Amino acid sequence: MKVTLLCNRDVRLEYVAPRSIDRLTRFAAFEWVECNHLTSYERLSDPNEETVQWLAETVNTSDAVVVCHGAPRLSAEVVASIDARFIGELEGDRFSPRVDVEAAHDASITVVDTTHGSSYAVAEWALALILVSLRNAGHHFRRFVEGADIGLTMAMRRQDRGFSDGELRAKSVGLIGLGYIAQELIALLRPFGVVVRAHDPFVDAGRADALDVDLTSLPTLMSLSDVVVVLAPETPLTHHLVCREQFDRLRSGAVFVNVSRGSVVDPVALLDRLGRGDLWAGLDVWEPDPCPIQSALRQSEHVFYTPHIAGVTAAARRRTFDLMVDELERFSNGVEPRAQIDRRVERGRGLPLETAPLPQPQNDAGSTAWKDT
């Protein structure tokens, strides 16, 4: 088996650890080809005729092609010109924008995306933002950096959300999205004895049962939760999914955390709800992202904001390639890869959330129509 990696030099240095190459070369020949094409998480333009020809010649003996930042898009024309039976995307935001997935499906090529290598880090940060928000730490840190007396009298504590209701233990946590991040976050939440509910119209009851999570509608989740965590990907389906109507359902004193994408939440509706003074938010993303200097969000004492750092760690980047090696080994042994981009995932891009049918149960519990950031 021959594996060719197409990416720029930064990816080769930061994502591909020597120990991962050692593992890979135990069962496959490995080749890295440096590429410096336009890179983006959005859909990329198809390559020109010259690049198509170059790609066909470059990977003509490869059984598997893995792409990441810097690689040209594997368009339908490219897919038709290669003999590879496996295409991998290291960091495609779970939807592989560098691959014409439909063309690959039609050619019976297995497509795998291991973006979820960052899910472990994101889950950790989601838990951190939950705890920080419950304890009203954003407010206290603001007072500290402003030079205020940070000693609290008992009277002040009685007015503090962190004193009155600041523990996570035994609370109700609602997850919007039940993909890879949610899976990791659920494991981190278990020691706190919380009740976990989730809304994800592309997840079947079997997966929810395996995770010991109750599935429910978005309105019900918002109204029953002490803590809501947004874990849904950015797609046309999820744009402003959490809107004014949903914020109105949140109970007074709730905590709201977003570690996915800013566009999933209506920023005006969130600011209006924060203005009531009864909602606390831990945010790693905003719309637009990063949060503009003039945004009213920066003035809210009920917000703890971080600049999109949840999943951006050196370990997470290396993990995306480690997971791809796992998938390549499975494929070489005739075993189904776990992180395939199948038609269920593709369907998550195009159907309205309220009308999208639940998929039939499948044996690919790691896959979901929403990415886990």
Image (cartoon, rainbow, N blue to C red):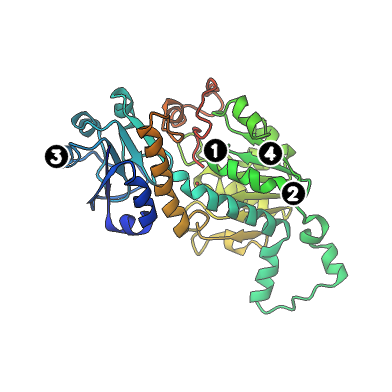
Q: Earlier in the sequence, mark 1 or mark 4?
A: 1
Q: Amino acid at mark 3?
A: Glu
Q: Is 43 left, or right, of 297 in this rendering?
A: left
Residue 57, disc: 3
Place of residue 292 in the rendered image (x, y in percent of width and height, measured from the top left) = 49, 60
Place of residue 3 in the rendered image (x, y in percent of width and height, measured from the top left) = 28, 41
Q: What residue is shown with label 2? A: 192
Q: Amino acid at mark 1?
A: Gly
Q: What residue is shown with label 1? A: 179
Quarter that holds the N terminus = top left
Q: Amino acid at mark 2?
A: Phe
Q: CA distance from mark 1 to mark 3?
A: 37 Å
Determine the residue positioned at 30% across, 23% down.
Answer: 106
Q: Earlier in the sequence, mark 2 or mark 3?
A: 3
Q: CA distance from mark 1 to mark 2?
A: 21 Å
Determine the residue positioned at 38% across, 28% down.
Answer: 334
Q: Earlier in the sequence, mark 1 or mark 2?
A: 1
- Mark 1 near mark 3, Cβ–Cβ under 8 Å? no
Q: CA distance from mark 4 to mark 3?
A: 53 Å
Q: Is residue 17 visible?
A: no
Q: Earlier in the sequence, mark 1 or mark 3?
A: 3
Q: What residue is shown with label 4? A: 222
